[in-house]
């Protein structure tokens, strides 16, 4: 059994309603949801499908370096 892995997601509220969802560690994974719960569920599904395809194709997960930048706004 594989060890579960957690991925950080970013939820962005949309003006027309709902949320856009991005996975910083997996830049090509993005989804959306009408509610927070739906957005989280869709993110989980999108991540699982992405990882499945990567494994089938024998590709490594992308390496991502995290950091923060401060700006005056």
Image (cartoon, rainbow, N blue to C red):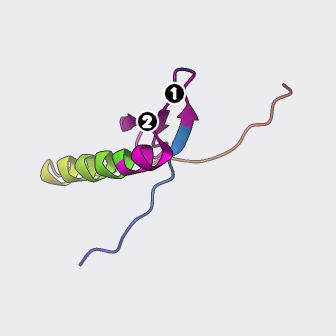
Nearer the N terminus, badge 2 or badge 1? 1
Q: Which residues are magenta?
A: 12-41
In the picture of the structure, the residue carrying the numbered disc 2 is: 34
| SS category of the residue bearing label 2 | loop
Q: Residues within 10 Å of mark 1 (few under 14, many from 20)?
A: few
Q: Residue at x 45, y 55 (%)?
A: 7
23 in magenta = yes
Whether pointer 2 and pointer 1 mark residues with C-beta atoms closer than 8 Å, the reply is: yes
* Residue 42 on image: x %, y %: 35, 45
| SS category of the residue bearing label 1 | loop
In the picture of the structure, the residue carrying the numbered disc 1 is: 17
- Nearest the camera: 34 or 44? 34
31 relative to 5, above or below: above
**Separation of residues labelled 2 and 1 (CA atoms):** 7 Å
Is residue 69 found left or right of 16 in the rendered image? right
* Camera sees residue 64: yes
Check the image and name the residue furthest to the right: 72
25 in magenta = yes
- Nearest the camera: 67 or 16? 16
Report the number of numbered marks.
2
* Residue 70 on image: x %, y %: 80, 36
Q: Residue at x 27, y 74 (%)?
A: 2
The numbered disc on residue 56 is none
30 relative to 15, above or below: below
Q: Quadrant of residue 6?
A: bottom left
* Camera sees residue 62: no
């Amino acid at each position: 059994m594989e060890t579960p892995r957690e991925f950080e997601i970013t939820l962005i509220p949309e003006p027309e309603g709902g949320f856009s969802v991005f996975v910083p560690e997996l830049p090509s994974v993005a989804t959306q949801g009408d509610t927070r719960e739906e957005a989280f569920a869709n993110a989980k599904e999108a991540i699982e499908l992405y990882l499945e395809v990567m494994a089938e194709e024998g590709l490594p997960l992308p390496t991502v370096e995290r950091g923060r930048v401060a700006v005056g706004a």
